[in-house]
Amino acid sequence: MNTQDYIALEEKYGAHNYHPLDVVIEKAGGVWVYDVEGNKYLDCLAAYSAVNQGHCHPRIVNALKEQAEKVTLTSRAFRNNQLPLLYKELCELTGFEMVLPMNSGAEAVETALKAARKWGYKVKGVKENKAEIIACTNNFAGRTITIISFSTEEQYKDGFGPLTPGFKIVEYGNAEDLKNAITENTVAFIVEPIQGEGGVVVPPDGYLKEAYEICKANNVLFIADEIQTGLGRTGKLFAFEHEGIKPDAITIGKALSGGLYPVSAVLSRKEVLGVFNPGDHGSTFGGNPLGAAVAREALKVLIDEDLINKSDRLGKYFINELKKIDSPHVKEVRGKGLFIGVELKDEAGGARRFCEALKEKGILAKETHENVIRFAPPLIIKKEEIDWALEHIREVLTMA
Ligand SMILES: *Cc1c(COP(=O)(O)O)cnc(C)c1O
């Protein structure tokens, strides 16, 4: 079977909820992926930052294999010997007090929203069913009905109503707007430190700190959605560290498992996650020993291979070199660490054609929104590989 055969099958039998680039990947290792025709590509998306540690990292693959031969799923009806260790290691690494494990990122966000509401009623004293949660314009937090209820992207909501009430929207990057939106019923503000799906949008310096102070002054939980920005992507363990704050809660996912398995979590204080009692919330697969063993190793790899500092160092280099490209199409290059967006001018004809041209040269990147190309390779990438990519990116960004 060749590329076209696989695409035909996918189009025939699968729901069309994605518009992938027409490359059919068969195997991968590190920063490289290989298609069914044997072509090799540098992965500059890293599965939306889920493979920060690189594809099929040998240590993480080994942890998966070893655990798969012991026990994979106990459900939380019984305990297992991996989850407690993941809890401890996560708390020691991050400085948070408590963990609630889930699978997908969307589930972690749902969990954080549930925790915030319950905290609002049980701790803050908000009247029943009055809790409000504030989110930002251009946010992305997943695809469940509740999460899309506070999306500002019309397509994400179209046809999926009735939506979940209880959300307010403020302008991303505008702390004053947040301040004005808070009422006595506000329980939480949820924000991405850098908006990934929104187009690698970096808010003004000081915004997160100001928003955090406003939340603190009003007894509102500041929840950072670090599912994409976390675990080294922006050159810090978490992107909130760039502003020296400590959120009341964070959501993590994606790279938590190095891309081998869906593992997500909410991290917070006892006062917040302590609102859950047995039976309040759960997930059959959440906290399973296979996921926990994989996540434990994925976190160790991040530290042992110094990937956070690498992201910082190589990200600065990559961004600077991208800025030097004299392209008629580029409006702005922005980002932190190896989380980089190249925004094109409206006249450039959309980012898609540039991503397709990059693919022809052996680089996989994906447009986000119409006009942004995201460059977010695995954090294990080498400087020589970035230099190789830059050569081709230069060619593509200077084409007609
Ligand atoms: C990807 C993402 C999510 C959702 O994660 P899924 O695993 O796709 O459900 C939530 N928030 C942010 C910021 C993300 O980038």
Image (tube, helix red, strand yellow):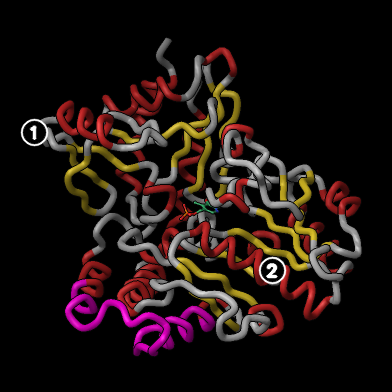
Q: CA distance from mark 1 to mark 2?
A: 50 Å
Nearer to the camera, 22 or 43: 22
Q: Which residue is mark 1?
A: 1
| Residue 1 vertical placement versus 99 (above, below) | above
Residue lying at the far front in this picture: please name it: 162
- Is residue 77 found inside the magenta-colored segment of the image? yes
Q: Is residue 183 visible?
A: yes
Q: Which residues are magenta?
A: 65-92
Q: Nearer the viewer, mark 1 or mark 2?
A: 1
The amino acid type, in three-letter code, at marker 1 is: Met
User: Residue drawn 43% across and 10% down?
Assistant: 400
Nearer to the camera, 284 or 20: 284
Q: Which residue is mark 2?
A: 247
- Is residue 336 found inside the magenta-colored segment of the image? no
Q: Secondary structure at mark 1?
A: loop
User: Residue drawn 29% across and 40% down?
Assistant: 42
Q: Which quadrant holds residue 224?
A: bottom right
Residue 1, x across and y down, in percent: 8, 33
User: Residue drawn 34% across and 27% down?
Assistant: 358
Estimate how packed mark 1 is, as few (under 14), some (14 to 19) or many (20 or more) residues with alpha carbons within 10 Å. few
Residue 378, x across and y down, in percent: 36, 52
Residue 336, x across and y down, in percent: 56, 49
Q: Secondary structure at mark 2?
A: loop
Estimate how packed mark 2 is, as few (under 14), some (14 to 19) or many (20 or more) residues with alpha carbons within 10 Å. many
